[in-house]
Image (cartoon, rainbow, N blue to C red):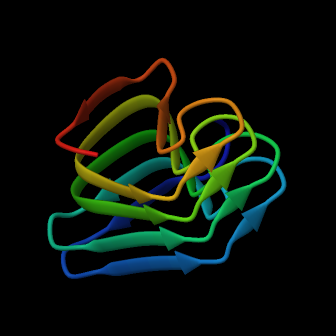
């Protein structure tokens, strides 16, 4: 992963992305680190990474203490909702109607250490 810096969604903050498109990876965003605080809102709806990975988000690491909501997201290959390559620690991932061309319709954690409370 060679794109993006860190995105920190702090307490009482909100990130909502709707109807996003990327030709390659990360339909809504490509970040090195995604950090979401406990009382934050993080939601991506209708994102498409047409050719490769991470319909909604492509990241090296994800640390989420709040729910990541991914809805109607699609990736051409892996990780219809989320594609992560190193570390994924999340309390809850709510993925609805996410699809991928190969595998990991909701989440693809390739070579990553994963700890997810619930999907």
Front residue of this view, candidates 49 and 11: 49
Front residue of this view, candidates 36 and 68: 68
In the displayed structure, would residue 104 be above or below residue 34? Answer: above
**Looking at the rendering, in which quadrant would you find the N terminus?**
top right
Front residue of this view, candidates 56 and 14: 56
Query: Is 109 displayed left or right of 99 in the figure?
Result: left
Query: Is 10 displayed left or right of 21 in the figure?
Result: left
**Image x and y of residue 70, in percent:** 45, 62
Q: How many marks?
A: 0
Outermost residue, top direction? 111
Which residue is at a point 21% across and 63% down the rendered structure image? Answer: 37
Which residue is at a point 42% across and 77% down the rendered structure image? Answer: 15
**Image x and y of residue 102, in percent:** 68, 30
**Image x and y of residue 2, in percent:** 67, 38
Q: Which image quadrant is residue 72 in?
A: bottom right
**Image x and y of residue 50, in percent:** 80, 52
Which residue is at a point 66% across and 77% down the rendered structure image? Answer: 19
In the displayed structure, would residue 99 be above or below residue 108? Answer: below
Query: Is 7 displayed left or right of 81 in the figure?
Result: left
Query: Is 118 displayed left or right of 105 in the figure?
Result: left
């Amino acid at each position: 992963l060679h794109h993006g810096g860190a995105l920190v969604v702090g307490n009482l903050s909100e990130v909502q992305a709707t109807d996003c498109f990327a030709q390659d990876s990360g339909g809504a965003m490509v970040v090195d680190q995604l950090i979401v605080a406990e009382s934050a809102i993080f939601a991506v709806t209708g994102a498409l990474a047409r050719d490769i990975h991470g319909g909604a988000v492509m990241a090296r690491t994800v640390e989420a203490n709040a729910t990541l909501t991914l809805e109607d997201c699609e990736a051409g290959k892996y990780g219809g909702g989320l594609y992560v390559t190193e570390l994924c620690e999340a309390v809850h991932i709510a993925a609805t109607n996410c699809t991928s061309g190969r595998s990991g319709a909701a989440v693809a954690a390739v070579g990553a250490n994963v700890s997810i409370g619930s999907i």
